[in-house]
Image (spheres, helix red, strand yellow):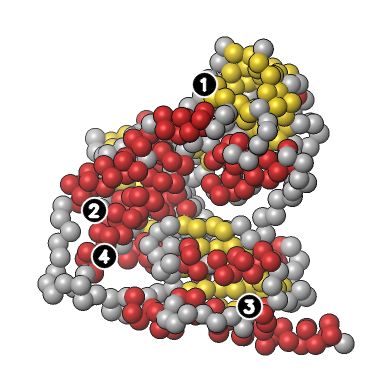
Amino acid sequence: MTEFDVVVLGGGSAAEGVWERLHGHTVAVVEADRVGGECPYVACMPSKAMLRSAEVRTLLRAAPALGAIRTSCDPGDGRSAYAAATARRDRISEHRDDRDMAGALERSGVALLRGHGRVAGPGVMTAGDTAIGFRDLVIATGSLSTTPPISGLDTVPTWTSDEALSSDILPASLAILGGGPVGCELAQVFADFGCAVVLLEAGPRLLGGEEPSISDGLRRTLQGDGVEVRLDTTVTEARATDGGAALVLEDGATVEAERVLLATGRRARIEGLGLETLGLHPGDALEVDDRCAVPGVEHLWAAGDVTGVAPFTHTARYQGSIIARNLMGDPARADYRALPRVVYTHPPVASAGITVAAASEQGLDVEVSSADLAETARSITEAADEPAAGCLVLVADRTRRVLVGAGAIGPGADAWIGVAALAIHARVPVEVVAEMIHPFPSFNEAYAAPLRDLATRLAPAREAVAR
């Protein structure tokens, strides 16, 4: 039996965060599917490629109003354009072939073992037909799409997001179940290429974990792109039809579509890993402490979606790096306070820290200030007719006089949310952040007024602390 210092079960983004930093250790990665995980092949990269193609298609329509051309520009047939976009998507995602990433992994000195990994007991696991030993084990098996418990759903044509981002089919109509990041991004992609999209969300708004004003802004954006958004909508039954599917709603109404896309969430991939041999019987996810170690079991770690902590690629890589630092003797601790969250629609939604609602649940005394993006000079130069729409919401802790949350929607928000993320991460006093000089004209200027407002309103608290 071959022995390794560290074995990583799963070869995705979390694994990369581990193995690329473990110098001087013998490391093996066990992967049953693709090295690189889902992000490069069926998730992040292909979805952002498709969103970019869809965005440019939208810009072509706006070209005359933007002064780029004198006459109207017909972006052409949506179906042929979609074929071109999926061809580009497949080039970017390496046609879902992991040979390059697998080769890079092995050239780094890491052993790659193909097959389903299962723990056989403390310090021992199997990878396919091979038994291997380890000192430390990292569980990085990711997550799986969930299927909502709807009667008859198994009788109608459905897609998971992975399947939608692997297919070159542009359906004439699409019903999307779930108004989270994945549902919203794919709704915009398909609508921009001419598909009739209905987005069904059981809750009262899209992106339920974000600020209401941000959610409302995204709803208006999607509706402007032709997406029919239905909130507070529960699907009770699915029926097969000649044209695809009929979804029966709680109020008795019916939504028909050629295909149904399931975007109602994901669950940790923890079944069949043999964790019971280590005395573990996890529920929805594998619990970790702030070192990303699994409590109660020595030398066991976990990173990525399997932990249930903020299911983003950057979270997985960050947790992997925390584990690697600990294994290298550096007692690192994970800090998610300023973890960015982005929905890459056009315009994007971006957030960091906590919302007003979350602050209230935590018992924090906060002040909130916001800005309308249309009040920045950049919004005038960026948009075709009306100033570019969007907003910024800042949440500050009165006691500590620091930002604890920020949310935004608007052009480039995924980049300029970094100002707030850094301030939250470094606990920079609001009055210091308010003194920043922003380039003109830029969307960063949206920070100026709400930060000055917060600095003024927090001044009494500052003076009380001084006394």
For discs 1 and 4, the disc positioned in front in the rendered view: 1
Give the numbered dot on residue 395: none
Element carrying mark 3: helix
Spatial separation of the CA atoms under disc 2 and disc 1: 41 Å
Q: Earlier in the sequence, mark 3 or mark 1?
A: 1
Q: Residue at x 36, y 37 (%)?
A: 94
Give the numbered dot on residue 433: 3
> Which residue is under mark 4?
59
- Please indicate whether residue 104 sits to the left or right of residue 320 in the image: left
Image: 107 above or below 430? above
| Residue 247, percent from left and from top | 37, 43
Amino acid at circle 1: Arg
Amino acid at circle 4: Leu
For discs 3 and 2, the disc positioned in front in the rendered view: 3
Spatial separation of the CA atoms under disc 3 and disc 2: 44 Å
Q: Residue at x 77, y 41 (%)?
A: 329
Q: Residue at x 35, y 43 (%)?
A: 92
Amino acid at circle 2: Gly
Q: Residue at x 38, y 62 (%)?
A: 346
For discs 2 and 1, the disc positioned in front in the rendered view: 1
For discs 3 and 4, the disc positioned in front in the rendered view: 3
| Residue 379, percent from left and from top | 38, 78
- Please indicate whether residue 278 sits to the left or right of residue 65 in the image: right
Residue sitting nearer the eye, 20 or 83: 20
Residue sitting nearer the eye, 456 or 40: 40
Q: Is residue 201 visible?
A: no
> Which residue is under mark 1?
114
Q: Earlier in the sequence, mark 3 or mark 4?
A: 4
